[in-house]
Image: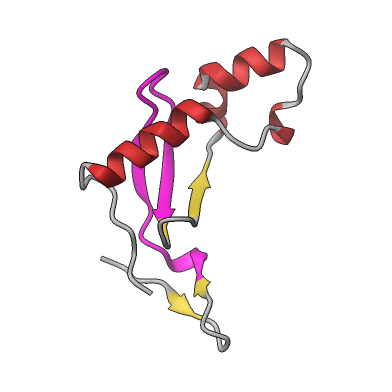
Amino acid sequence: MTRPIHYQGGWPDERHADYQRVECERCAAAVEVAKFSVQQTSVQWSPASVRACAEFAARAAAGEQSALIDTCASLRDSIDRAVRQGRLEVLPP
């Protein structure tokens, strides 16, 4: 398993994190996720996952641009559940 590489100031370099696939329990949109702490989560969306996201689709239909939508509450719940169930690791500092 790859661990984050640290910058001189001690901040993790997300480019080398161990991303894990998480699927949204609402719409099955699959994203790559790395958890650096309980509060810090990095989510990598693909074009296919943006298209599959039910919340993004509803908000885009209401006139929002998907690139400006900051989060999907359903996916956030799925990520939090994956952490609680041990399916997604919070990476050590």
| Residue found at the far left of this picture | 86
**Residue at 52%, 16% in the rendered image:** 54
Q: Position of residue 24 (x, y in %)?
A: 39, 27
- The reply, left or right, for residue 85 in relation to residue 59 is left
Image: magenta residue range: 13-34
Residue 14 lies in the magenta-colored region = yes
Above or below, 93 against 89 in this view is below
Q: Nearer the viewer, residue 44 or 48?
A: 44
Above or below, 66 against 45 in this view is above
* Structure colour scheme: secondary structure
Q: Quadrant of residue 9?
A: bottom right
Q: Nearer the viewer, residue 21 or 39?
A: 39
| Residue found at the far bottom of this picture | 8
Q: Position of residue 47 (x, y in %)?
A: 57, 31
**Residue at 47%, 55% in the rendered image:** 39
Q: Position of residue 51 (x, y in %)?
A: 56, 22
Quarter of the N terminus within the rendering? bottom left
The number of callouts visible is 0
Q: Position of residue 43 (x, y in %)?
A: 50, 46
- The reply, left or right, for residue 70 in relation to residue 2 is right
**Residue at 53%, 37% in the rendered image:** 46
**Residue at 33%, 70% in the rendered image:** 92
Residue 64 lies in the magenta-colored region = no
Q: Quadrant of residue 3?
A: bottom left
Quarter of the C terminus within the rendering? bottom left
Above or below, 89 against 80 in this view is below
